[in-house]
Image (cartoon, grey):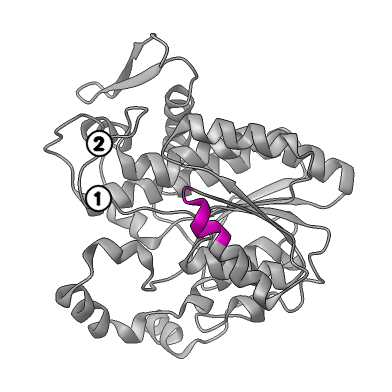
């Protein structure tokens, strides 16, 4: 009850910010981002678009990857209308396709740009069961696996940039408190829903699984970056509950009524972008890594979300799934992988 009251009134936490803080407010003391190059996925609308707008206002160079180049160009135009000096690069990227991720990274590397900040923000809630071209359930493929490969392929550039510039690199994974809704065996369930005509598919559970994967990815990657002694951190954020285009497939009276009834708990888009902006830029978070943030303050994770064994297990499975030249096929009964070695 006390935590709910704090949320409703926007009481500030240890960071000095709370649920009512906005992206602009939490970046006022970031010292300017004119030396920062940032990649932000899912920046054509909603929380991602607001995050991009705020970082551009603070001077960051932005790379905006998107499936729709028109949507990305429109987002760029909106930002430049407010900040004419903003430097923004639009690129194509479909996170549900591992080949598209590889092509994006190859093209980005050809620009010879530094990379200080990676914000894995894009999200999808698939109401109907679908399988990606790589044989993975679509929500998981888009929300987690595409970001896993994107991060993996960009790490070398981020580590080099941090070493050359002396500016600590930051990776921000945007998750959701809905990850708490998943229970059970992560790999087994993913195997079950990554089969055609899956009877086990539940849209909400699949979404929760993908967001749990974001949390576990953060935990394992932070450990690996420490072991490598890199000057790059990774943290995870829950932006809060906000109505964005994520619900666009279920517009109607029922959806409208649900959001009306919970309106007092909803954040505005500027408020929802605050935690991402805070974790991405605040000088007080230097060397802070492997943490989970909500309402611009560090928060605890669930028992499953903090399970290092489960995080390592998911990492191993992810490495298999993104392996070039082999299509990972799950055996849901044994939670192991078979391999189709034929080239796609």
178 horizontally vs 315: left or right: left
Residue 268 position, x and y percent, is: 45, 80
Q: Residue drawn at (72%, 35%), measured in percent from left and top? A: 109
- Mark 2 surroundings within 10 Å by alpha-carbon count, few (fewer than 14), some (14 through 19), many (20 or more): many
User: Among all residues in the image, which is located at the extreme top?
Assistant: 341
Q: In this view, does 84 lie to the left or right of 312?
A: right
Between residues 265 and 51, which one lies in front from this camera angle? 51
Is the residue under label 2 in contact with that under label 1 (CB below 8 Å)? yes
Quadrant of the image occupied by residue 221: top right
**Residue 245 appears in view:** yes
Element class at badge 1: helix
- Marks 1 and 2 sit apart, C-alpha to C-alpha, by 9 Å
Q: Which residue lies furthest to the front in this view?
A: 70
Residue 42 seen by the camera: no
Q: Name the residue under label 2.
A: 189
The x and y percentages for residue 80 are 68, 70
Does the magenta-highlighted stretch encompass residue 23?
Answer: no
Q: In which quarter of the image is the C terminus?
A: top left
Vertical position of residue 153 compared to residue 22: above or below: above
Indicate the position of residue 186 as horizontal and vertical percent values: 31, 38
Q: Which residue is drawn at 19% across and 23% down?
A: 333
**Which stretch is magenta?**
67-73
Pointer 1 or 2: first along the chain? 2
* Residue at point 39%, 73% (across, down): 242
Q: Which mark is residue 205?
A: 1
Q: SS for tag 2?
A: helix
């Amino acid at each position: 009850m006390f935590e709910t009251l704090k949320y409703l009134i926007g009481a500030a936490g240890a960071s000095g910010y709370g649920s009512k803080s906005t992206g602009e407010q939490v970046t006022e003391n970031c010292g300017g981002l004119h030396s920062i190059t940032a990649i932000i996925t899912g920046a054509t609308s909603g929380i991602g678009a607001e995050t991009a707008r705020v970082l551009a206002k603070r001077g960051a160079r932005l790379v905006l990857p998107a499936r729709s180049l028109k949507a990305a160009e429109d987002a760029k135009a909106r930002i430049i209308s407010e900040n004419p000096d903003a430097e923004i690069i639009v690129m194509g990227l479909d996170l549900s396709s591992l080949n598209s991720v590889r092509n994006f990274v190859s093209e980005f590397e050809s620009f010879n740009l530094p990379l200080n900040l990676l914000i894995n923000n894009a999200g999808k809630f698939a109401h109907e069961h679908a399988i990606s071209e790589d044989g993975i359930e679509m929500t998981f493929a888009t929300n987690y696996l595409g970001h896993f490969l994107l991060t993996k392929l960009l790490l070398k550039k981020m580590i080099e940039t941090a070493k050359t510039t002396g500016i600590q690199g930051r990776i921000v994974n945007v998750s959701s408190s809905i990850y708490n809704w998943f229970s059970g065996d992560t790999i087994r369930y993913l195997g079950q829903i990554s089969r055609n005509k899956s009877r086990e598919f539940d849209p909400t559970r699949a979404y929760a699984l993908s967001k749990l994967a974001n949390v576990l990815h953060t935990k394992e990657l932070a450990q690996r970056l420490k072991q490598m002694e890199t000057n790059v951190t990774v943290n995870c954020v829950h932006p809060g509950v906000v109505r964005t285009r994520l619900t666009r497939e279920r517009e109607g009276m029922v959806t409208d009524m649900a959001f009306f009834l919970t309106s007092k708990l909803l954040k505005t888009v500027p408020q929802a972008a605050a935690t991402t902006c805070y974790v991405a830029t605040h000088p007080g978070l230097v060397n802070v890594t492997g943490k989970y943030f909500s309402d611009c303050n560090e928060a605890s994770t669930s028992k499953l979300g903090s399970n290092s064994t489960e995080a390592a297990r998911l990492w191993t499975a992810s490495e298999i799934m993104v392996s070039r030249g082999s299509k990972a096929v799950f055996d849901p009964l044994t939670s192991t992988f078979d391999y189709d070695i034929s080239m796609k």
